Amino acid sequence: MNITIDFTHDPAAASWVAGANGHSDFPVQNLPLGIFSTSDNPTPRGGMAIGDMVLDIPAIAKHLEGDAAAAAMAANAPALNMLFKVGRGPITALRHAVFTLLTDTAMQAEIEPALHKADGCTLHMPFVICDYTDFYTGIHHATNIGSLFRPDNPLLPNYKYVPIGYHGRSSSVRISGVDVKRPSGQTKAPDADEPSFGPCKRLDYELEMAIWVGQGNELGEPIPIGDAEDHIAGISILNDWSARDIQAWEYQPLGPFLAKSFHSSISPWVVTMDALAPFRTAQPARPEGDPAPLPYLQDEADQANGAFGITMEVLMTTSAMREAGDAPHRLSQGPMTAMYWTAAQLIAHHSSNGCNLQAGDLLGTGTLTSGDEGGKGSLIELTEGGKNAITLPNGEKRTFLENGDEVIIIAYAEKEGLARIGLGECRAIITG
Amino acid sequence: MNITIDFTHDPAAASWVAGANGHSDFPVQNLPLGIFSTSDNPTPRGGMAIGDMVLDIPAIAKHLEGDAAAAAMAANAPALNMLFKVGRGPITALRHAVFTLLTDTAMQAEIEPALHKADGCTLHMPFVICDYTDFYTGIHHATNIGSLFRPDNPLLPNYKYVPIGYHGRSSSVRISGVDVKRPSGQTKAPDADEPSFGPCKRLDYELEMAIWVGQGNELGEPIPIGDAEDHIAGISILNDWSARDIQAWEYQPLGPFLAKSFHSSISPWVVTMDALAPFRTAQPARPEGDPAPLPYLQDEADQANGAFGITMEVLMTTSAMREAGDAPHRLSQGPMTAMYWTAAQLIAHHSSNGCNLQAGDLLGTGTLTSGDEGGKGSLIELTEGGKNAITLPNGEKRTFLENGDEVIIIAYAEKEGLARIGLGECRAIITG
């Protein structure tokens, strides 16, 4: 597998868009793709984030040629699915062309009319999601959760062989910022004879990353791991909200269902594989004694460079904190290399039975808890199953989420000598 | 909940379409909806099955008025999703209007050009499937499968309270007739130290029925059970092919994944709730000692009339049987009332956490094994986990499916004094 490192973009390059320089998530080296609309043009269409602005891609098609122009025209749609069907070549060409336009001050006057203040834009779901699959690649999370049920044997025997995953609900994925309504459902207290129906009492977040499929495969034609990378459009941040009490009662024998399907939140910007290329890193070595992946999941280049050098943070506020003007409180920080399997291994495994992936499929990584104390990616881990409440800076305590709580997940990549790039944020408030 | 019994259709009425009378699945009392195309007009569009013909719905719009005409125009699309968004009223109006046109011999000359021989039509997926959810309502199946793992306690404690279900893969659902390619995957023999990757050795079918969602709900707004019936478009036949050996190794703790996602087969015709109305029947009484459903799953009219009086049969042929011209061999026959939960209960439960259903969502009933010896809906049940092979009339033996085997599922409703209606068939051949 070849992971192309995009050296053509000078890491020191600055854009004439003032807000793109400095500490922005969106310098000219990033150029993530999304769908936006504006009050004067409410038709959702493809955009790129640049600093504190959004670039209207179809509006600059006239300044482009060849593949880049074709990609810009395919971005004139209410979702990115069509754009990614055009293929990675044209998308990379578009990226190069926009990089040039936004760094060449001679183009400023011509391009500026296609820029909109991000504050004034409405951001929409980047893709029409075909199928949503949630994996379980966070081995520390799997171990922590397993420990709550099986202290002596937290990881099941298949974990280190099978990239465990399950089908999720695509209809209820919503863009960052949409409130999350607390679900009701059947729960059964350990000491109760019968279950009862009512509002979830153990509402949790899950820190995940989203991998978007850009190129699908035909039914019956698995994607070899060496080709898997070419099928990925990019990544975003995912919060897979979880009703722990509903899950505990419903999930045997077929897995989580209503405990997850009430809402999942996704960040609006798709950071492309081109932008991420300089931040790719080795898959962490498997601990001594762990089995080697089966051949269909093995690729040397993937092991050497298939992971993402991204840092993720979860922050929260309560109603009281927001009223008092308190800063969000950080609950965890950790690396995306907490994934036991790479994105390419997930693609290869998912299609290994012939299952057809499609542009716009969403793959969740599963909760990415790090091996460190400060890297727990969910409240059930932070509070040890709700037994030990956490205390917020203002003295409020939480075991699980209360109405009015807001969870904010951010993620970014930093590396010596490179421009820092960010994924933006995935945030939502719980309502009753 | 009101289940409208459609008395307006004379059960003795005959159509001037000759093939619609006699033992056809598709008399004028049925009029199921589907998507078809013809060699002279390859654009997929809405059709109705009538005897051995397919009626081109958009082509007769000019003979219709009001709601019926609106519905006929909404059927001018490559999937039925738009038609069902128009609402049940117009679809019922269309049904009545077509009933009149096809029974009134004065209309024959005008309507005949819109009829195509079914043999010459290509049938397509009736809906663009948004999400596919597979339930587990077959209590005899759940008991049989549970017995293989837990002989003393086959049903888990939640079974009689929670309509157990899980998210399925929508991208790999294919219309009846499309070959099923045997999947490969990880399996682990009980005595092996490690898993290996290769072709599935325990490939099975699952006899299921499909419930199509016609009307969705908004995120966060559950569908009360009393309204659930109005959200159903109709039913079809579903074969949820299963790789038992892949499933056994992968399914803990998050449920079936690649064991199911390689292919599911669906019959092409959607038999509407109007056509089924005269065949609705009482939900079988819960055995003595079973708990009552929780209030959100209880509805008196649903208990009295929420089940479907439908008979289902599984038949198979092998390559050798087809070469010899042997008739298909029946593997099982049983009633759809094997469902422990009604369709309305599935809709109410699915949306009870606020999850939004959408027109085109596919709900599988789960394998519908009856309580009788002749009603086992899968090979894993018929062969007791592969231990006791079945013998076919020509002497061939099977534990699981071999390449070249064809599985055919049919379903029909019969009742004294009513015209028999059928659902057509769901068939596919296994390839290597």
Image: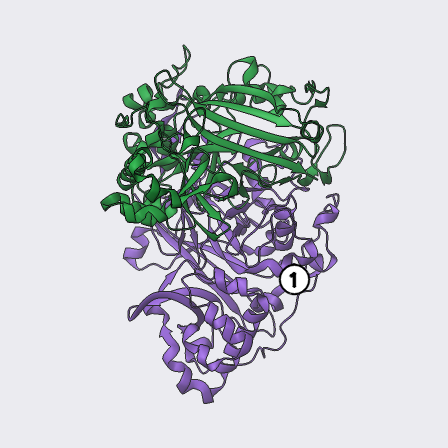
Chain colours: A green, B purple
Q: Nearer the viewer, residue A237 or A68?
A: A68
Q: Nearer the viewer, residue A414 or B116?
A: A414
Q: Nearer the viewer, residue A337 or B335?
A: A337
Which quadrant of the figure has residue B334?
bottom right
Residue placed at 69% from the left, 24% from the top? A399
User: Which amino acid type is marked by label 1?
Assistant: Thr
Q: Nearer the viewer, residue A241 or A28?
A: A28
What residue did someone put label 1 on? B281
Residue A288 is left or right of residue B165, and the answer is: left
In the rendered view, tell whether residue B99 sits above or below residue A362.
below
Q: Position of residue B1 (x, y in %)?
A: 70, 61
Q: Position of residue A12 (x, y in %)?
A: 33, 22
Residue A355 visible in the picture: yes
Element type at mark 1:
strand
Residue placed at 42% from the left, 82% from the top? B111
In the rendered view, tell whether residue B104 sits above or below residue A26.
below
Which quadrant of the figure has residue A220?
top left
Q: Chain of mark 1?
A: B
